Amino acid sequence: MSNVKEQVQAFLNKCEELKNCKFIMATTKIKDLLKCIVNSSELYLLFKEVTQNFDYNEFKKRCLITAHDGYVNKSYVSLPDAAGDRLAFIFCLLVEFDRDSINFNSFLQRYYAEDGSYYSSYHAFCDDVICNLQTLIQSVFELELADGEMQQQNYSNQNESNAYLASVLTQIDFLLRREIEQINAIQIQDEEKEAGVNILNELYKAIKQANVNLIDALLNGYHYFCAQNKIQTDSFKELVNTISNLLGALCD
């Protein structure tokens, strides 16, 4: 494929095919989705990066949950909070379905047992897992999908660097959303909340554009905003550290 937009759009189309196909074709469509990743240099490197140090077995224990409630056991899937971990977990899960190391039919009946039918279970799975996958990929490649052009010069000409930066962006996206939620929950004046949220939204745009000077200016502005309003959120330190790592990578 000639550019990133084509690669990513082809992948998103495969996600739509998976969501809309008949249940009997699901495992074939999962195989097609994984082939699409292998055939795309950008997607392949992204998934390689996010799974590199990912402890899938540990996350399976956390995310595939069975709750004991009296005489009834209820099993469900709780996807990881961090966007990079969520992307890695979904990918590894799909690989297990493809290899049949986890039987897809049994998985649906256990973790997405809606009305007992495979049809309902399958659509609940797609609404949860595949829609999450689509959203994450759309977030990572937002500029490429919007402009239709490769934006790699904003970061680096090396594919490995792009994949690393893309994985960092998924983490920053999650942290910014969590920061905004915490700002909105704090008891300060509405205009102050709006100012803080606007800084964070502009910060994310600057990050997507790889505008180092603007990132630095907005980050300083947000530091000042937090100091003035005596705000210290749970995600602030992690957010600053992650953005600092990104700035270091962009300046290399």
Image (cartoon, helix red, strand yellow):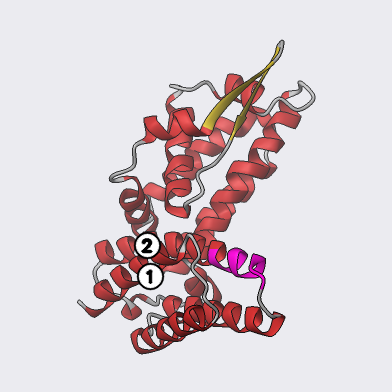
Please give the residue where the numbered disc 1 appears in the rendered image: 240
Is 236 placed left or right of 194 in the picture?
Answer: left
Mark 1: which secondary structure?
A: helix
Residue 55 vertical placement versus 107 (above, below): below
Start and end of the magenta stretch? 179-187
Q: Nearer the viewer, mark 1 or mark 2?
A: 1
Residue 119 vs residue 7, the one in the foreground? 119
Q: Specify the farthest residue to the front.
A: 230
Amino acid type at image mark 1:
Val
Say which quadrant the C terminus sits in: bottom left
Residue 70 vertical placement versus 131 (above, below): above
Q: Quadrant of residue 229?
A: bottom right
Mark 2: which secondary structure?
A: helix
Asked whether 154 falls inside the magenta stretch, the response is: no
User: Badge 2 local density, few (<14 within 10 Å), some, or many (20+)?
Assistant: many
Amino acid type at image mark 2:
Val
Look at the numbered discs 1 and 2 and tell me whether their residues touch, using CB distance below 8 Å: no
**Magenta stretch secondary structure, dominant:** helix
Q: Which mark is residue 168?
A: 2
